[in-house]
């Protein structure tokens, strides 16, 4: 520890090893971010203005779209800025803030997706009690629980990481302040730090995943008991969109956060991180709008009103 130095800023390496691709990546990520913002804002607006969508399922979907906006805004704008610079720097505090909000939005979304699976379980398995169980107060409480979980994890992880001594280097081989590249800059042996983070991340990810699996086992069992093939297809379609979003989001998260550091290849994992930080958020509005007749109907009505208003 005698050679320990105080790190006041970090250099974000980003995609600097691919200078010939920077212009292309900038345009690609800019387009993806624009589509993500446009799609999720559209979902938020149509659910807010259309009374037919004022149900628990769409209440949670609106909150999910809000989280997707925050989740992508934490990383993509800064990544776009970095692609335009020769060398990108971020302050120690700025890096901590970015990691904090990344965890805040990410963990809140993890828990909210499990809440949405519970909502589908109640709607399909015990439909006669749906309106009683999933009333407005319960929906708000479940959303607040999701936010509280995000707050606790973000505060705990960020405080823990940034109280460790950084002395090896200040170059982060990633496009934002990610937890694994930061651990590689910590002084000394980080084995137990790594174990604690993996265990904690595993718990945070696996608890919602377990609830989702239990909910969908019950849902599938109920669907298979239905006599009509048409009823089975119609019922499953009400939760298939959520299942697709869950698969995309958790697939990348589980792979990235439950592995030992020895298995990392930062250059490879940097690209894999794009799946849940850039790609998945754009699929949320696409999946829910293309596979949901009510959302498509509300979108059509809103578009018609806007056209009529512009002509008038």
Image (spheres, helix red, strand yellow):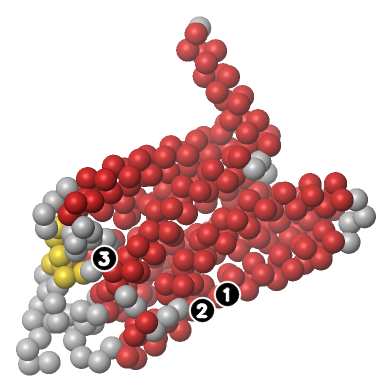
Foreground mark, 1 or 3, reads: 3
Which residue is label 2 attached to?
A: 203
Which residue is label 3 attached to?
A: 174
Which is more N-terminal, label 3 or label 1? Answer: 3
Say above or below: 141 vs 56. below
Say above or below: 62 vs 265. above
| Picture disc at residue 297 | none
Say above or below: 73 vs 147. above
Of the pair 13 and 293, the residue shown nearer to us: 13
Which residue is label 1 attached to?
A: 207
Residue 138 appears at what percent x and percent y? 65, 56
Residue 206 appears at what percent x and percent y? 55, 75
Q: Looking at the image, do the residues carrying marks 2 and 1 touch, with CB atoms under 8 Å apart?
A: yes
Of the pair 152 and 117, the residue shown nearer to us: 117
Q: Residue at x 43, y 59 (%)?
A: 275
Q: Secondary structure at mark 1?
A: helix
Q: Is 174 on the left-hand or right-hand side of 244?
A: left
Q: Residue at x 27, y 79 (%)?
A: 183
């Amino acid at each position: 520890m005698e050679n320990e130095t105080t790190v006041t800023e970090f250099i974000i390496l980003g995609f600097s090893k691919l200078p010939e691709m920077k212009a292309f990546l900038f345009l690609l990520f800019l387009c993806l971010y624009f589509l993500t913002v446009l799609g999720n804002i559209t979902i938020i607006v149509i659910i807010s203005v259309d009374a037919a969508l004022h149900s628990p399922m769409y209440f949670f979907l609106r909150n999910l779209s809000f989280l997707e906006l925050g989740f992508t805004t934490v990383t993509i704008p800064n990544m776009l800025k970095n692609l335009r610079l020769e060398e990108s720097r971020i302050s120690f505090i700025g890096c901590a803030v970015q990691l904090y909000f990344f965890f805040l939005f990410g963990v809140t979304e993890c828990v909210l997706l499990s809440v949405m699976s519970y909502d589908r379980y109640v709607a399909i398995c015990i439909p006669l009690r749906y309106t009683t169980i999933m009333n407005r107060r319960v929906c708000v409480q479940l959303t607040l629980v999701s936010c509280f979980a995000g707050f606790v994890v973000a505060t705990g992880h960020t405080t823990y990481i940034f109280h460790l001594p950084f002395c090896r280097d200040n170059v982060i081989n990633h496009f934002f302040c990610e937890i694994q590249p930061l651990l590689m800059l910590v002084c000394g042996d980080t084995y137990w730090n790594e174990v604690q983070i993996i265990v904690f991340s595993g718990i945070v990810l696996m608890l919602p995943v377990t609830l989702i699996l239990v909910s969908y086992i019950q849902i599938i069992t109920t669907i298979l008991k239905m006599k009509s093939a048409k009823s089975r297809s119609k019922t499953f379609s009400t939760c298939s969109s959520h299942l697709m979003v869950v698969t995309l989001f958790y697939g990348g998260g589980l792979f990235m956060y439950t592995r030992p550091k020895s298995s990392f290849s930062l250059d490879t994992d940097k690209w894999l991180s794009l799946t849940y930080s850039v790609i998945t958020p754009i699929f949320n509005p696409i999946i829910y709008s293309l596979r949901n007749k009510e959302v498509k109907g509300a979108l059509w009505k809103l578009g018609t009103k806007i056209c009529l208003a512009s002509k008038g």
